[in-house]
Every structure is written in C-alpha cells, then in structure tokens.
C-alpha cells in the first residue's frame, strides 16, 4: 500500500455508519425487460458500494448470473421473469456499523402480475 499512515487509517476507520446517497426504490418492470436498483453511500472519506452478497431478495442473498449483474452499487436484472418480483434490499457496511434499505419490485407479465408484499 502506498501513501502515508493518515491516508491508510482514514480509509479503514469510519466515524459513523454509512448513510445512503442512493437507495433502492419501489418499481414495476415488464416481463422480458430489465430492471435496475441502485445503492451507494456518502460515507466519509469515500463512497461505499455494496458487494453482490449485500443484495438480498426476500431476505436471501442474490447470486450473480448471466441475468443478474452488479457493478458500482447498481443491481441489474435482465430478461426479468415474474418470479423476479419480490422485496430487494441492500446493506452498506463500514467499521462503524451498517445500514439497510429495501424496495418492492413487481414484474408484470402478459397475463398479469405476480405480487409480493413484505410484512
């Protein structure tokens, strides 16, 4: 690692849990289309982006695939299917704690929608 000790310490120790700059919002998508959810932090000293494992659908970690990709805090699901409907959450974490936000996604198909509501 290059840099002085102040730079190294300031990038590894946070003074407070991350606050969201962008967070997932409820949305409706069309079967066969694409949906995107964003998640990032205004954390000091740099932005924090969640890892793919920090994204969950209905409380279970997402797994990257040809359809489900992730880059710089943006979760993209291509060729969405009705079963992609659900509650999606992302967690931002630093040394001072964590913060989680979630959103409901509804996928509309040719013959209607598959609805999921979190309780």
Image: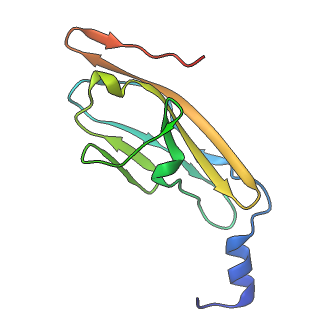
**Is residue 26 shown to the viewer in this render?**
no
Looking at the picture, does residue 91 appear above or below residue 33?
A: below
Answer with left or right where residue 42 lies relative to residue 85: right
- Identified at 78% across, 56% down, the residue is 16
How does the figure colour the protein chain or chains?
A: rainbow
Looking at the picture, does residue 90 appear above or below residue 95?
A: above
Answer with left or right where residue 4 lies relative to residue 66: right
Residue 4: x, y in percent? 69, 91
Answer with left or right where residue 94 lies relative to residue 102: right
- Identified at 45% across, 17% down, the residue is 116
Quarter of the image for residue 109 reads top left
Image quadrant occupied by the N terminus? bottom right
Q: Nearer the viewer, residue 6 or 63?
A: 63
Residue 62: x, y in percent? 43, 42
Looking at the picture, does residue 8 appear above or below residue 43?
A: below
Residue 113: x, y in percent? 32, 12
Quarter of the image for residue 96 reads bottom right
In this view, the residue farthest toward the right is 15
């Amino acid at each position: 690692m290059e840099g002085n000790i102040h730079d190294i310490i300031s990038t590894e120790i946070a003074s407070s849990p991350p606050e969201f700059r962008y967070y997932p919002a409820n949305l409706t998508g069309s079967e066969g289309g694409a949906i995107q959810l964003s998640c990032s932090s205004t954390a000091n000293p740099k932005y924090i982006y969640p890892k793919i494992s920090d994204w969950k659908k209905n409380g279970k970690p997402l797994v990257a695939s040809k359809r489900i990709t992730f880059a710089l805090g943006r979760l993209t699901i291509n060729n969405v299917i009705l079963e992609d409907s659900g509650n999606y959450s992302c967690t931002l974490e630093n040394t001072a704690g964590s913060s989680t936000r979630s959103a409901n996604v509804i996928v509309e198909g040719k013959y209607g929608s598959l609805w999921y509501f979190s309780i």
